[in-house]
Amino acid sequence: MTRDEITTGLAEILEEVAGVTPDDVAEGKSFTDDLDVDSLSMVEVVVAAEEKFGVKIPDNEVQNLKTVGDAVSYIEAQS
Amino acid sequence: MAHTDVVVTGLGATTPLGGDVASTWDAMLNGQSGVSALTPDWAEQLPVRIAAQLAVDPAELLDRVKLRRLDRSEAIAIIAANQAWADAGLADSGLDPERLGVSVGSGIGGALTLLAQDDILEASGPRRVSPHTIPMLMPNGPAAWVGLELGARAGVHCVASACATGAEAITLGLDMIRAGRADVVVAGGTEAVIHQLPIAGFSSMRAMSTRNDEPEKASRPWDKARDGFVLGEGAGAIVLERADHAAARGARVYARLAGAGITSDGYDIVQPHPEGAGAVRAIAKAIADADIDRGDITHVNAHATSTPVGDLAEIKALRQALGDHPVLTATKSMSGHLLGAAGALESIATILAIRDGVVPPTINLDDPDDGLDLDVAANKARHLEIPAALNNSFGFGGHNVALVFTRA
């Protein structure tokens, strides 16, 4: 799966869970500062991403995923 | 002791009869029933397959993403409160948030969330349980969300007294203003538990009507053929305001909340006292609190839920506490029983009855029970001078709440 495909998949999750406009989702965007994803919604995003991409994202990793790019890299390395 | 004068300046509701107060009141005056057949698959196995479902689904009014975080009872509480807030003209009034309180209760709370998340837990494991579960199912959730929506900072409260909840929440709002803790309180109740488990529980108590073939005729307070209540869902909110505060901003005033009385039976966890002793005391307290003559009360919106025992116990209580002059109605014949929202919706009906000088009908009262020896506006609305009116609410646990509203 390419980085672009993972980004697109995350954008779908972010739209469903937090109402983020898919066009706003890019690797440089911060989940909390740019996309307004709060801590509870972030939990939903992580669980949905685990399911969608078939990966495990432990809670102690989630705090390192500040940007969409961080998440894409983590998922890319796991899958 | 002379109390601070408290008035009603805003009304909001979403009910089985309409998505707002105006449509709900129109439906009541026209004697419409909000009861219909339950169509989900799960209803097939139940002894009760009817309910009074919301006329307008909250999904039509609230944003999809926001709804993901709201139990249905919370969503409709927000809708009703926002309507009442706008109706009161408080949106851009510059009201100090530290003088604004909220008192919104629920009889059962976020049961739909609890049950849905339990299904997820059983099917997919704990990691799939939504992080929004707790704020969605906590009983204070509706009050807290209304407080957030309106920015209330004088205290946000959740009353729970089963089917007396809505009325008791209103009395708490009255107390808050009288005690000087707030100038304005948004008060009411909400309930949304149309699901197989609550229905199975109530029907195991033999408390619900099983008139599945004629949903619109199932809720029939005081009729000989009544066989239990019909579960309804909905929310009602009223804006209570210190009278001089309302006058200073030129607010439209619907009515005064002149007095309230609360008692507890100390008798049985679910059975009403057969003579309605606790109800008699609650009504007497409300009249004394309002400092009016009982003869001024010409109309009663009764609790009357269409159960064999409760309906007649209330008649005995009313006769003893008020006499035989008031014209009664039971709007649950149309709305069904909204449990924790019932006292709020019926307060709204009582307030509008005073304003319009009309008693909404009790539908399906075709063959009055022998024990019904008071005057009821049966099957047709009735015009009446209403200087003061009483709204009764009683709840499992032996809660009795009586509210007295008077003409503004």
Image (cartoon, rainbow, N blue to C red):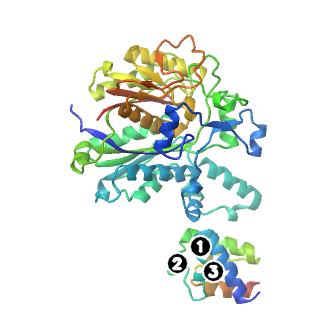
Say which chain tag 2 marks: A
* Kind of element beneath mark 2: loop
Q: Residue at x 36, y 34 (%)?
A: B355
Vertical position of residue B22 compared to residue A73: above or below: above
Q: Quadrant of residue B270?
A: top right
Q: Amino acid at mark 3?
A: Glu
**Quarter of the image where the C terminus of chain A is located:** bottom right
Chain letter of disc 3 in the image: A
Asked which secondary structure carries label 3, the reply is helix
Examine the image and state in which quarter residue A61 appears.
bottom right
Same chain for the residues at labels 3 and 2, yes or no? Answer: yes
The count of marks equals 3
Q: Are marks 1 and 3 on the same chain?
A: yes
**Left or right: B49 with respect to B310?**
right
Report the amino acid beneath label 2: Thr
Residue type at mark 1 is Met
The one nearer the camera, B241 or B202, is B241
* Residue B165 seen in this snapshot: no
The image's mark for residue A61 is 3
| Residue A32: mark | 2
- Are there few (<14), some (14-19), or many (20+) residues within 10 Å of tag 2? few
Q: Secondary structure at mark 1?
A: helix
Q: Residue B175: where, in percent of width, then height?
A: 32, 40
Q: Say few, some or many: other residues with alpha carbon within 10 Å of mark 1 (under 14 / 14 to 19 / 20 or more).
A: some
B137 over B38 or under it: above or below = below
Q: From the image, state whether disc 3 or disc 2 is nearer to you.
A: 2
Residue under label 1, please give it: A42
